[in-house]
Amino acid sequence: MATIEEMVGDAELLASYAATNLMVLPAGCTATLLGAKGREAELSTPGKERDEFYAAFNAATTALNTSVAGIRASQARRQRLRPLVADAHSLLDFAAANAKLVDDDIRNPLLAGADAVDRGSPSVTDEQTFLKAYQALSAKTAPVTADTLEASRTKLPRIVDPFSRTAWAAAWKGLTLGRFFNAAIFIGVLLETCVSLGYYSVGSAGLARYGELSATIAKLQAGLPQKRDQVDLRSIATSAKGYEAKSDDERAAAREKLIEA
């Protein structure tokens, strides 16, 4: 048996269900149901107020022609079907874009089920028909599935994603062990490539500098004999000038030195 707190929550659910499905409740019923929230202590004791609440609750279920359990079951069914509806639409779009024929007895139940989910009240029959058609569609588009289509999409992060907790949580959602290892291997290879490029840049700069220095040294070595000849000529000229300026004895000594040289 439901407690008064649970019934107050169910009363709000009944009022929301009626408003969502454009259904009219008896006069004063909506106000009584919504006004019960926060008054659980008063409604827990027998009296006029509790009797009015019970009467409004029964009138609402009678007008809606459904129970609270039926509404909750419909909501749970809607939550289960919502992601499948999105996957079905992705496969239908893929089939239409790639000239894959999808029969009407497959497409129409899927669209009808999506409409029931959007309206917020899919029945058991809607769920059964939708799942049967979705199974047939998956067989038609195999090996392409909703998961493979999702994995093939390129998703660029937004600028604010690194600073958003929601974005980080969404990035880790659905992460499997295989995807984690693939990402780890990719990051490792990327880092190794960056380090290798760094060493390559330093090495290429060193080799280029070595080539420039080698060319300069070769050029200097090629001109070294000519420089030596110029030095020798200058030495001889200097010696000759000194020879003329000296006395006869000094000239004779210088002549002998030149002869010996």
Image: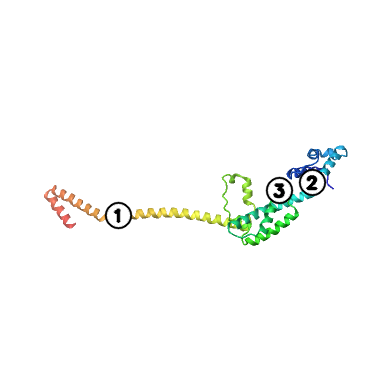
Task: Name, please, the residue furthest toward the right.
Answer: 46
Query: Does residue 134 appear left or right of residue 8 in this picture?
Result: left
Q: Is residue 91 above or below residue 39?
A: below
Secondary element under disc 1, as helix, strand or loop, is helix
Q: Which residue is mark 1?
A: 219
- What amino acid is labelled 2 in the image? Leu
Decide which of 73, 106 is in the foreground and name it.
Answer: 106
Decide which of 182, 39 is in the foreground and name it.
Answer: 39
Residue 243, percent across and down? 15, 50
Q: Which mark is residue 119?
A: 3
- What amino acid is labelled 3 in the image? Arg
Name which of mark 2 and mark 1 comes first in the sequence: 2
Marks 1 and 3, Cα distance to the nearest angstrom?
88 Å
- What amino acid is labelled 1 in the image? Lys
Name which of mark 3 and mark 2 comes first in the sequence: 2
| Image depth: mark 1 or mark 3 in front | 3
Query: Does residue 41 appear left or right of residue 202 in this picture?
Result: right
Point 28% across, 56% down: residue: 222
Snapshot quadrant of residue 150? bottom right
Q: Is residue 162 above or below residue 177?
A: above
Q: Which mark is residue 64?
A: 2
In the rendered image, is residue 260 in sight? Answer: yes
| Image depth: mark 2 or mark 1 in front | 2
